[in-house]
């Protein structure tokens, strides 16, 4: 506006009496600026806060609402920049909104969590002005807070609901009695042709003077331990077919599978424990059941982070054997490197098998599988293809050795991990292998 006042210099070139008009214009502009500045409220009359659409989950878009409450006498146009960590957004968001006099203005922006755990939200930097726009003030709102990014709860809930409706979980929920399954006593009934003699209750038979059979059902309230490896091999990223170009690690898939398995197991009546380890034990949650226990597992899984060093499998095996002396189901989610000798994790899995039933899951790398299945086009591709086949063959031999020792050993792609583990758990429960 001050530059516009220079237009008065054109007529002042011919008549000097027009020269004071320039100064009068400048005085008018400065007066309006001062008036506008006085009308603007001080930063203490503005209140900023964030509103979250819900709990943050890994890989699930969420919305954050910035709200500004204006206790001043004039409406404000605000331009705010929120200090967000790079794990939620690539760049800090900037929003524009209007906050009415003695009212509130809101504006939303989206975030996409890329890492689990705690993320620190910083300050909000604000520039605000009235509708005149002559003056502008700046303020900093200290609304720093710590938010926690949880595992993908929606995926775990979806898997649990889908499997609960399936035939296997319906069988478990209704506690259907099936011949030869389960050894938990349920009731007595008259002997029928085809019943096993070992199920005859001779004391009841002598008392009633009639053959009486014990009826059993599938055992409930068994213990399931989920053992989660957080070593360097689980840090490998797996490309995603999504517009956000999100890259999840093997550990992220393992955490989602562990959460789904924990939900299904607790809803089936079992008690679930969690042991996450790297160079040391990172999370050790004793077996339990119920909504509060599941929440504890969710919080524990949210804090699990991949490590750059090799995991200490001996520590995990020692802790598990010390804390769980009775036979239980151990679901071990890990990976192992191709070495000339037997990997350490396989040796300790065999050791645990002496006391517990072990489901050993090694996570495959999708690009390695694709390379082994591809047709070589040149010499370089041929060598890569041969190397991939050799790696796959060695891994298959190691897992085959585990199966011969009584371990349920699998090599799964990350995307198949959740459904495969849950189905394997349900199959073990149905067959009463514990």
Image: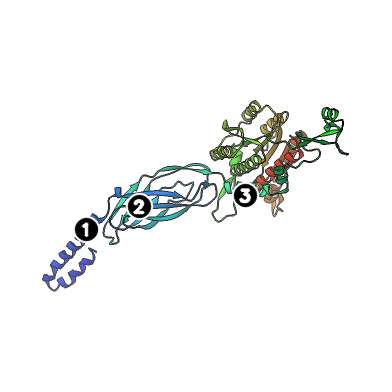
Report the residue that reaches farthest toward the left.
17
Residue 80 placement (x, y as % from top left): 37, 53
Please determine whether, in this image, residue 131 is positioned above or below residue 254: below
Q: Residues within 10 Å of mark 3 (few under 14, many from 20)?
A: few
Tell me how far mark 3 sits from mark 1, CA to CA: 59 Å
Residue 248 placement (x, y as % from top left): 57, 47
Please determine whether, in this image, residue 16 is positioned above or below residue 81: below
Name which residue lies at 56% across and 49% down: 247
Question: Is any atom of residue 68 visible in this view?
Answer: yes
Residue 432 placement (x, y as % from top left): 75, 37
**Numbered label attached to residue 69:** 2
Colour scheme of the picture:
rainbow
Tell me how far mark 2 sits from mark 1, CA to CA: 23 Å
* Residue placed under numbered mark 1 in the picture: 35
Report the residue that reaches farthest toward the front.
208
Q: Nearer the viewer, mark 2 or mark 1?
A: 2
Q: Is residue 404 left or right of residue 128?
A: right
**Numbered label attached to residue 87:** none
Residues 72 and 415: in front is 72
Quadrant that contains the N terminus:
bottom left
* Residue placed under numbered mark 3 in the picture: 158
Sequence-earlier tag: 3 or 1: 1
Q: Is residue 29 left or right of residue 311?
A: left
């Amino acid at each position: 506006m001050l530059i516009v006042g220079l237009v008065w210099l054109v007529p002042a070139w011919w008549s000097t009496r027009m020269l004071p008009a320039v100064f009068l214009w400048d005085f008018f502009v400065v007066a309006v600026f001062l008036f506008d500045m006085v009308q603007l409220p001080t930063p203490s009359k503005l209140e900023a806060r964030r509103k979250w659409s819900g709990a943050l989950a890994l890989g699930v878009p969420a919305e954050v609402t910035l709200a500004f409450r204006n206790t001043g006498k004039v409406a404000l146009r605000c331009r705010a920049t929120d200090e967000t960590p790079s794990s939620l957004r690539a760049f800090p968001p900037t929003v524009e909104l209007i906050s009415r006099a003695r009212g509130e203005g809101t504006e939303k922006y989206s975030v996409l969590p890329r890492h689990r755990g705690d993320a620190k939200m910083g300050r909000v930097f604000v520039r605000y002005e009235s509708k005149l726009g002559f003056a502008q003030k700046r303020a900093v709102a200290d609304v720093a807070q710590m938010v926690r990014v949880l595992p993908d709860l929606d995926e775990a809930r979806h898997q649990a609901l889908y499997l609960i409706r399936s035939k296997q979980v319906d069988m478990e929920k209704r506690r259907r009695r099936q011949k030869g399954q389960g050894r938990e006593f349920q009731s007595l009934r008259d002997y029928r042709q085809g019943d096993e003699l070992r199920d005859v209750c001779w004391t009841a038979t002598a008392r009633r003077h009639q053959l009486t059979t014990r009826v059993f059902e599938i055992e409930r309230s068994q213990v399931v331990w989920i053992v989660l490896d957080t070593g360097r091999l689980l840090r490998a990223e797996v490309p995603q077919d999504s517009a956000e170009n999100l890259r999840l690690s093997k550990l992220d898939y393992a955490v989602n599978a562990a959460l789904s398995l924990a939900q299904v197991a607790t809803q089936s009546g079992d008690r679930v424990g969690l042991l996450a380890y790297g160079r040391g034990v990172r999370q050790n949650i004793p077996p339990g059941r119920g909504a509060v226990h599941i929440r504890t597992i969710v919080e524990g899984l949210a804090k699990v982070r991949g490590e750059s060093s090799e995991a200490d499998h001996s520590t995990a095996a020692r802790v598990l054997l010390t804390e769980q002396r009775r036979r239980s189901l151990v679901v071990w989610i890990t990976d192992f490197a191709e070495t000339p000798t037997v990997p350490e994790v396989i040796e300790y899995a065999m050791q645990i098998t002496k006391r517990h039933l072990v489901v050993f899951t090694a996570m495959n790398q999708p690009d390695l599988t694709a390379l082994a299945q591809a047709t070589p086009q040149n010499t370089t591709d041929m060598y890569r293809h041969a190397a991939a086949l050799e790696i796959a063959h060695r891994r298959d031999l190691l897992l085959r050795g585990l199966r011969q020792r009584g371990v349920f050993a699998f090599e799964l792609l990350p995307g198949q991990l959740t459904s495969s583990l849950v189905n394997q758990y349900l199959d073990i429960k149905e067959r009463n292998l514990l």
